[in-house]
Amino acid sequence: MTERAAPTTMHIGELADRTGLSNRTIRHYDEVGLLHPSGRTEGGFRLYTDTDLARLLIIRRMKPLGFTLEQ
């Protein structure tokens, strides 16, 4: 039997680098309910997973197509 590895997490800065979005934009998406961090560190820093990264990339691709944040 194989054990499942814990999901890899990243801080907001790495997520911003990997998506080309700013930290401020990612925090705004959290505030409006589009993308919530998968967790937080003991110090309160946001933690994101590869699933969050994929969701954010989809959101980024949809924006130029004319979709509003609410859609």
Image: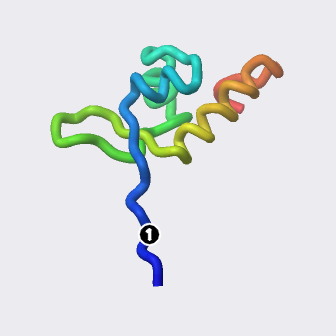
Q: Residue at x 78, y 17 (%)?
A: 64
In the picture, measured across the screen, residue 57 lies left or right of residue 30, that is: right
Badge 1: residue crowd in 10 Å (few <14, some 14–19, many ≥20):
few
Q: Give the residue at the far left of this rendering.
A: 43
Is residue 50 positioned above or below 61 on the image? below
> Residue 1 at x, y = what percent?
46, 85
Q: Give the residue at the far right of this rendering.
A: 65
> Residue 15 at x, y = what percent?
48, 29
> Residue 7 at x, y = what percent?
43, 54
Numbered circles on residues, count: 1
Q: Residue at x 55, y 34 (%)?
A: 34
Q: Residue at x 33, y 35 (%)?
A: 46
The foreground one among 47 and 29 is 47
The foreground one among 50 and 60 is 50
Is residue 14 positioned above or below 43 on the image? above
Task: Report the residue marked by disc 1.
Answer: 4
Q: Secondary structure at mark 1?
A: loop
Is residue 26 positioned above or below 53 on the image? above
In the picture, measured across the screen, residue 70 lies left or right of residue 38, that is: right
Identity, as a three-letter code, of the amino acid under mark 1 = Arg
Q: Quadrant of residue 12?
A: top left
> Residue 49 at x, y = what percent?
46, 45
Is residue 71 positioned above or below 13 on the image? below
Q: Residue at x 44, y 15 (%)?
A: 24
In the picture, measured across the screen, residue 57 lies left or right of residue 61, that is: left
